[in-house]
């Protein structure tokens, strides 16, 4: 009887010990691991398998820019469009233009068809990548002073590259017009079974529509509908008008302050703020590139496109940013946040800190992070590299 009591007591002690150990482990898990970001990051479901590179486009991350948020009274976030597979927001546009052309019977999968475009670089890279993924060929016309990184990428992707002298849109040999002529030449050739489309990103409404249908909804969802300001540059006008139209007209965020960040020499600053599409820096004999006198690629223009015109009424303000400010901001973000961004993203970031001075405390600002600095090494980042790593926001703004 005594042995049985001892055995029962030993068993009880063992069970109690196991329960105590399990409870202690559980409380440690609850306190130190369950709520830690590292543990949650591990638990996040990995992305599902995608059936093709084109299926990777969109659903890009949103990140808080800690340095800018801590240095201002606002919370500043970046929509990382540079995480698209070809490295920029133009992936969405290129894909939607091609899918729309297929739907309209202008392109046929399995046929050796072509996509032609005139671009300063990023849209061409996106078109080249997607054409490869879907079985098409690409023909890209661009200014011959486009950064060597973009030219190399296009050539590496197998695009036919046509380099032309920078010129005004009224010049028949300007890069957009050159692309259109090349497309017409193919379609008039009766000796081939191939057909082509001119992507026409500036006027093609598949541009703003893809941002209305995807980029805008993603931003709204990621920010839980709490967006006090949205900032983007304007090249074709598709991103800013598409996102703004969704936020204001679909979600009713009429108090969301939409800002067009504009480089020096571009006319949008005066167009939005004063109703006149003119800038003193573009007067005869002063422009380096005939279109916009700036080192910034991808944004800035001196004409109204159909994509811009479609949603201009949803843009509340334009903020002018100089090349010097953008160059310094790029270095600041790299040193302080590990964000290695291109010129147009730097423009947006400068506009964000200028806007933050005018907004209430803790306002939530979203900017578009368009592409990586790796596309701008030989031009924009050649100058940004020379900036002292101890650069401050005061140095950037010059006050």
Image (cartoon, rainbow, N blue to C red):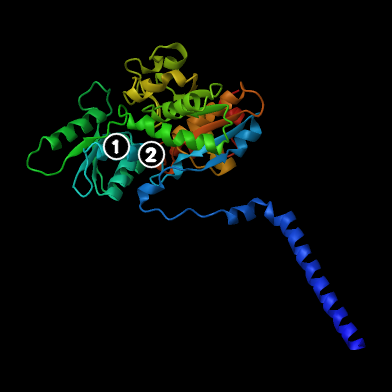
Give me the residue at 86% from left, 80% from top.
Answer: 8
Q: Where is 83 relative to 242, above or below?
A: below
Q: Quadrant of the N terminus?
A: bottom right
Give me the residue at 10% from left, 43% from top.
Answer: 192
Disc 1 designates what residue?
A: 100
Residue sitting farthest toward the right: 2
In the rendering, which numbered label is found on residue 92? Answer: 2
Give me the residue at 58% from left, 38% from top.
Answer: 65
Find residue 323 and report its horizontal and vertical position in percent. 46, 28
How crowded pointer 2 is (Cα within 10 Å; few <14, some 14-19, many 20+) is rated as many
Say what secondary structure mark 1 lies in. Answer: helix
Find residue 11 and report its horizontal and vertical position in percent. 83, 79
Q: Is residue 135 left or right of residue 73?
A: left
Quadrant of the rendered structure where residue 233 is? Answer: top left
Q: Quadrant of the C terminus?
A: top right
In the rendering, which numbered label is found on residue 136? Answer: none
What is the number of callouts on the image? 2
How crowded pointer 1 is (Cα within 10 Å; few <14, some 14-19, many 20+) is rated as some
Which numbered mark, 1 or 2, is in the foreground of this view?
1
Find residue 2 and report its horizontal and vertical position in percent. 92, 87
**Would residue 138 be seen by someone viewing this image from the given angle?**
yes
Marks 2 and 1: in contact by CB < 8 Å? Answer: no
**Would residue 392 be seen by someone viewing this image from the given angle?**
no
Residue sitting farthest toward the left: 191
Whichever of callouts 1 and 2 sits on the residue coming sooner in the sequence is 2
Q: Is residue 102 left or right of residue 387?
A: left
Query: What is the C-alpha distance between the residues marked 1 and 2?
Result: 12 Å
Q: Is residue 132 left or right of residue 23?
A: left
Find residue 347 and report its horizontal and vertical position in percent. 48, 30
Give me the residue at 26% from left, 29% from top.
Answer: 176
Give the camera-side residue of 175 and 149: 175
């Amino acid at each position: 009887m005594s042995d049985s009591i001892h055995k029962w007591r030993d068993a009880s002690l063992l069970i109690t010990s196991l329960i105590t150990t399990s409870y202690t482990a559980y409380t440690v898990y609850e306190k130190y691991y369950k709520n830690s970001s590292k543990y949650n990051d591990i638990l996040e479901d990995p992305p599902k398998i995608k059936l093709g590179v084109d299926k990777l486009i969109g659903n890009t991350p949103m990140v808080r820019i800690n340095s800018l948020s801590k240095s201002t009274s606002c919370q500043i976030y970046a929509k990382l469009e540079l995480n698209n597979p070809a490295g920029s927001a133009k992936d969405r546009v290129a894909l939607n233009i091609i899918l729309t052309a297929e739907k309209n019977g202008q392109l046929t999968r399995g046929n050796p068809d072509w996509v032609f475009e005139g671009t300063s670089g990023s849209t061409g890279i996106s078109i080249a990548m997607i054409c490869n993924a879907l079985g098409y060929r690409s023909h890209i016309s661009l200014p011959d002073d486009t950064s060597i990184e973009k030219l190399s990428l296009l050539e590496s992707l197998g695009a036919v590259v046509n380099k032309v002298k920078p010129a005004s849109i009224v010049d028949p040999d300007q890069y957009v017009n050159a692309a259109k002529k090349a497309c017409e030449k193919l379609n008039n050739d009766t000796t081939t079974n191939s057909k082509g489309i001119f992507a026409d990103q500036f006027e093609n409404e598949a541009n703003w529509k893809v941002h209305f249908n995807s980029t805008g909804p993603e931003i709204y969802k990621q920010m839980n509908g709490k967006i006090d300001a949205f900032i983007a540059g304007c090249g074709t006008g598709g991103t800013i008008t598409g996102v703004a139209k969704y936020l204001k007209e679909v979600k009713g965020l009429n108090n969301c302050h939409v800002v067009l960040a504009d480089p020096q020499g571009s006319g949008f600053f005066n167009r939005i703020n004063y109703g006149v599409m003119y800038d003193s820096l573009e007067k005869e004999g002063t422009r380096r590139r005939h279109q916009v006198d700036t080192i910034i690629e991808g944004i800035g223009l001196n004409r109204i496109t159909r994509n811009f015109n479609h949603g201009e009424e949803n843009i509340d303000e334009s903020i002018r940013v100089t090349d010097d400010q953008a160059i310094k901001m790029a270095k600041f973000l790299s040193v302080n946040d590990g964000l290695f961004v291109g010129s147009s993203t730097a423009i947006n970031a400068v506009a964000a800190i200028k806007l933050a001075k005018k907004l209430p405390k803790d306002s939530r600002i979203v900017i578009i992070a368009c592409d990586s600095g790796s596309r701008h090494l030989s031009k924009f980042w050649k100058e940004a590299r020379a900036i002292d790593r101890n650069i401050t926001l005061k140095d950037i703004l010059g006050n």
